[in-house]
Amino acid sequence: MQMLEVQDLNIEFHDHSMPETVVYDFSLSMAEGDIVGIVGESGSGKTMSALALCGLLSRHDMTRRGRILFQGKELLTCSRQDMRQLQGREISIIFQEPMTSLNPVKTIGWQVEEALRLHTRMTRKERYEKAIWALREAELPEPERVYGQYPHELSGGMRQRVMIAAAIVCQPRILIADEPTTALDVTIQDQIIRLLQKLNKEFGTAILFISHDLSLVRRLCHRVVVMQNGQIVEQGDTEKIFRNPTQDYTKRLIAAIPSCDKEKTEWNQIGTVVLKVEDLHASYEDAGNGIFRHGKEKEVLKGISFRLRQGEILGLVGESGCGKSTLAKSIVGLKRDYQGRIVGAEGRIRMVFQDPYSSLNPSRTIDWILEEPLKLSGVSKSERREKVREMLRRVGLETGIADRYPRQLSGGQRQRVCIALALMSEPAVLVADEPVSALDVTIQAQILKLLARLREEMGLAILFISHDLRVVYEICDRVLILQNGQIVEQGLPQTLYRHAAHAYTKQLLKASGVVEVNI
Amino acid sequence: MKKKLKFNACVGGILTGGMLLFILTGIFFLPYDPDAMNAELRFAGMSLAHPLGCDNYGRDILTRMLVGSRTTLLVALGTIVVGGGVGTLVGALTGYFGGWLDEVMMRVIDALFAFPSILLALVVVSLLGAGKYNVILALGIAFIPSFARVVRSQYLKLKEMDYVKNARIIGCGHFRIIFVHILPNTLSVLVPTLMIGFNNAVLAEAGMSYLGIGVQPPDASLGRMLSEAQTYLFAHPLQAISPGFAIVLLVLGFSLLADAMEEKGCRC
């Protein structure tokens, strides 16, 4: 018998006036030591299925049909007491956001030990030893020191390791990982994936890995389940599905993964220089406490120089904390206390932000938002209307959405509106700060296509900031690699990706699995 | 959850609507002169001529309630306009700009906050003298801190949003950002706060008039009427019950409405 059997699971919410089914007939079986991936875009029901498995869905608001058998035990109908016995001991879960999934006022040790306190009769000393063991297994440096620290003292990657330590401390049979690497940098992502593989090998822990990142799933999982709109579209061996997808949806998903194998046509550098950044230095003040005390200055940009030509898409790659966002802010004029020179395109630089949910004013309609730049330059009402309509068509939206509010649009539509807003005042330079990293792969591909088209049509120069090397390869003409506020390497993507010279570039390429490089 | 919400909105709406209708009636029609005394009718009980009876001077209680609740509503609304207006302005500016302005203003607000609002209003009234408009001013000042704090915290949060940054990039001035871009987004929090503030203002007016420093005789207000009735509470409870009941209905109705609004605000 399989360790975990899910048969025809249906989840239906009654929260709204109409009952809404989020998962239809979900079936899955897992044996010990299996790594199964669930992939799908947002809203496909992958997280809901996982939450149902570990008993985290409220029994009030919903009906669940079907069966979940864990080691022969019915999870949907068993008493809460029995469920609690399994949670944390046999079934553990790791969440996406390491910043919020740890309790900020408790020490790391206390949180790792919590499962032991609930499920075992260990003495204080035994618990301590077990916790240290788990922290060491999660490959945290100096587990004894980390044991006494608080979450805010650790980096994102370390917190995710702590989450893993807390999840494995009771040596569960199955570990559910809900987008565990989405919030992390590529090199950290790579380490976490390796860690999960190690745990799977060493203890035979089965892992249910939920992700929207297909390349990660391909690396880690033995089997894969593809979900769309709450239904399983396809499932089977990972390699088989990636090589020969049978369903249209799976084909579309796989085709949407940006790939670095394509040959790129070489871009000829003939446009005029529209933006020149020379020896840019910028620093941030740490938050000082008190009225008159000032924090320490921290230099985040250390002499950045580059040129951006008309019609060029320049990629800027780096991990969090490398100064990408500071650079973007300095260029668009949100940060003014920098040293060095930024010349060209004064007042004609616009920006597209990462999160399409926070970059549109939620209490205004789309046409109000889009008309705002024109209002400031005193364009008449009828002309404004006309221009908004034209711009909406240009970014591939229907003009009918003009009188809707941002919350009534999907993520992809919002990002199109954000691009439209940036283009309303006919800028020369567009700074796009991770414009596609919050979007699903198929939407991502559409937005990238849109940006490329707009560049052709309007001769726009785009500074494309991203941490995703594949996306950058797909769209950019030239790439800058940024590390600790310095440009360590630059060049055309096709040459840079194949013949990287700097160690950091090699490390990035390797971690994201783009190219196998020997360091 | 949803059912309870509808119930709140429904009952709150009916109570508030009823009270407003009552006050509206008083503007166009009064059965008697609210200040006319009649020694023969002292403590008269309920009758067809005087549905709620008469008070210790023989004035018709229903008439005085029609006038009194109008005064109370006026004072409460005035308080909200003064306190909410200044509070929102202070909160918006300090939250948005931060820096030394924020430090100085917030310390002043903290100092104001440290006094109970009634006590603070007492000080203002004793400086300016009693009377309807001075009570509005006094309560308004006392109510500034609570609004300023709520609005400031909203601005602190919202000014970091990308749409605000975007507004700056496309060239909006600070004041346009503060009032046109950010302010509408604070309404989901501001409106319930104003409604709760309104309730507190009704109670504060009643409290001040009761203490004798609010609305001055012979003007009627619900608190004033309670204060006058207190002396004869045991002998003639009817005189106290009517204005007391009116205060309860007014506050309860608004509270329920505020609850419903707040819930709704959380949802969207």
Image (cartoon, rainbow, N blue to C red):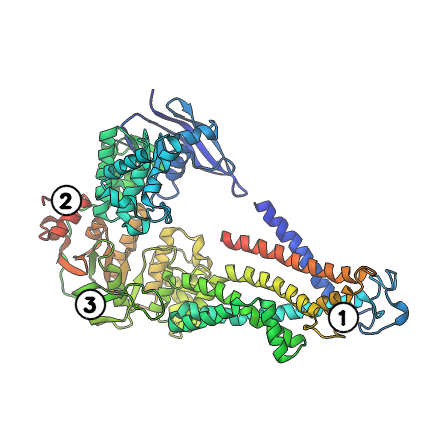
Q: Is residue A50 visible?
A: yes
Place residue A320 in its image quadrant: bottom left
Q: Report the disc number at residue A515.
A: 2
Which chain is disc 2 placed on? A
- Residue that badge 1 annotates: B28
Category of crowding for the residue at label 3, using alpha-carbon neighbours closer than 10 angstroms: few (below 14), some (14–19), many (at least 20)? many
Q: Amino acid at mark 1?
A: Phe
Q: Nearer the viewer, residue A469 or A129?
A: A129
Q: Position of residue B126 (x, y in %)?
A: 63, 77
- The kind of residue tagged 2 is Val
Disc 1 chain ID: B
- Residue B188 in the image: x percent, y percent? 51, 59
Measured as percent of width and height from the top left, residue A233 is found at 35, 34
On screen, residue A25 above or below A442: above
Q: SS of the residue at dot 3?
A: strand
Report the front residue among B128 and A365. B128
Q: Quadrant of residue B162?
A: bottom left
Is residue B246 placed above or below A156 in the rendered structure? below
> Hey, which quadrant is residue B256 in on the image?
bottom right
| In this picture, residue A123 sits left or right of residue A341 | right
Quadrant (top left/top right/bottom left/bottom right) for the N terminus of chain B: top right
Q: Is residue B125 left or right of residue A19?
A: right
Chain bearing tag 3 is: A
Q: Which residue is mark 3?
A: A281
Image mark count? 3
